[in-house]
Image (cartoon, grey):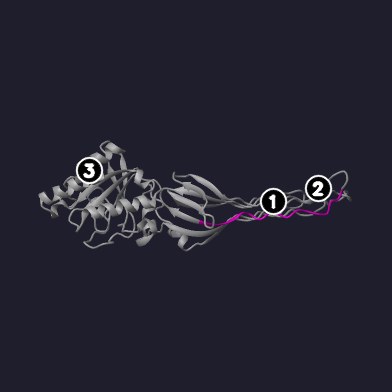
Amino acid sequence: MQFIDQAQIIIRAGRGGDGIVSFRREKFVPAGGPSGGNGGKGGSVIFEADSNLQTLLDFKFQREIFAKDGVKGGPNKRSGATGEDKIIKVPCGTEIRDNQTNIIFGDLTKHKQKIVIAFGGRGGLGNSHFLSNQNRAPEFFIEGKEGESWNIKLELKLLAEVGIVGLPNAGKSSLISAISSARPKIANYPFTTLVPNLGVVRKIDGNGCLFADIPGLISGAAEGIGLGHDFLRHIQRTKILIHLIDSAAENPINDFLIIEEELKKYGNGLLDKTRIIVLSKKELLESNNLNVITKKLENLSKKKVLVISSSLREGLSQLLSEVWAEI
């Protein structure tokens, strides 16, 4: 299934039905009064979060969504039927914004959570509504009102508790594959991962914790280079970030600084989140070199640095213990 996390659509609520002009005409009632009924209210456009959905793919092919119009009034003071509401289901974690002003209309994070984005138009009034002592036979009606219409932007932000960040080829996909049942594509070249991967890791009490491996970041990601913004927003909701650094890279210290700077530039509280610094691929370095890099990182970050090997499954238990202690 293709992962789509952004979409732009036009929604329009239903128009209210018109009122009508009608007079009561029955045998032995030669001068029946006005009997034109009111129009029905237009249907509204409602968004509903659905935990069974994982992508905004449906909106790639459906760019305009309309609710039903209300029905016009009828004779004998019959009101028109209300237009059917249009319920649009989206994945949990979907943020709904006005495409022009960027104002947030709603943020759906819980299953079955609903929000009305476009309200249906009010139904018109039939001539029976205007009967009065001064006017016993009104011959006019009011039309129904147009429903609200919006050009909106949908953005899906993953609801993972733990995010894994790092430069391309830092070993993020290998890590999530080693600690969960997720099976992302793994290869020894940059940008193997092009969409976020999710994996559920079981805690000691048996409850699941959702980890998100986002595609590799590069310098300038906060400004959108390398689809940086598309990737970084998926860790906005996380509680903890695992900052993964390839210990066998040419300059692991510089790699660490690049990601820290991008988190700082992007803002949105990313740099304030609890971060666990982890050196990966320990099997590729001699212990002396590894110790030197570890010490430098600890002095620079003022944090404890963990050392792991996803392929040998070494250090993973300690890493998870650190995560559980912070959640």
Tag 3: amino acid: Leu
Number of callouts in the render? 3
At label 2, counting other C-alpha atoms closer than 10 Å, the crowd grade (few under 14, some 14-19, many 20 or more) is some
* 71 in relation to 298, above or below: below
Residue position marked by numbered label 3 in the rendering: 319
Element marked by disc 2: helix
Check whether the beta carbons of the residues at disc 3 and disc 1 lie within 8 A of each other: no
Residue 327 lies in the magenta-colored region: no
Q: Name the spot of residue 155 as percent of width and height, x first.
A: 45, 54
Residue 160 appears in view: no
Residue depicted at 75% across the width and 53% down the height: 142
**Is 32 placed left or right of 172 in the picture?**
right
Of circles 3 and 2, the one toward us is 3
Q: Which region is colored magenta?
A: 136-152
Residue position marked by numbered label 2 in the rendering: 130
**Is 206 placed left or right of 96 in the picture?**
left
| Main secondary structure of the magenta stretch | loop
Element marked by disc 3: helix
At label 3, counting other C-alpha atoms closer than 10 Å, the crowd grade (few under 14, some 14-19, many 20 or more) is some
Q: Name the spot of residue 274 as percent of width and height, x first.
A: 31, 42
Residue 82 appears in view: yes
Dot placed on the residue nearer the N-terminal end, 3 or 1:
1
Spatial CA span between label 3 and label 1: 61 Å
Residue position marked by numbered label 1 in the rendering: 123
**Camera-side residue of 147 and 20:** 147
Mark identifier at residue 311: none
Residue 140 lies in the magenta-colored region: yes
**Is 274 placed left or right of 29 in the picture?**
left
**Camera-side residue of 97 and 279:** 279
Tag 1: amino acid: Gly
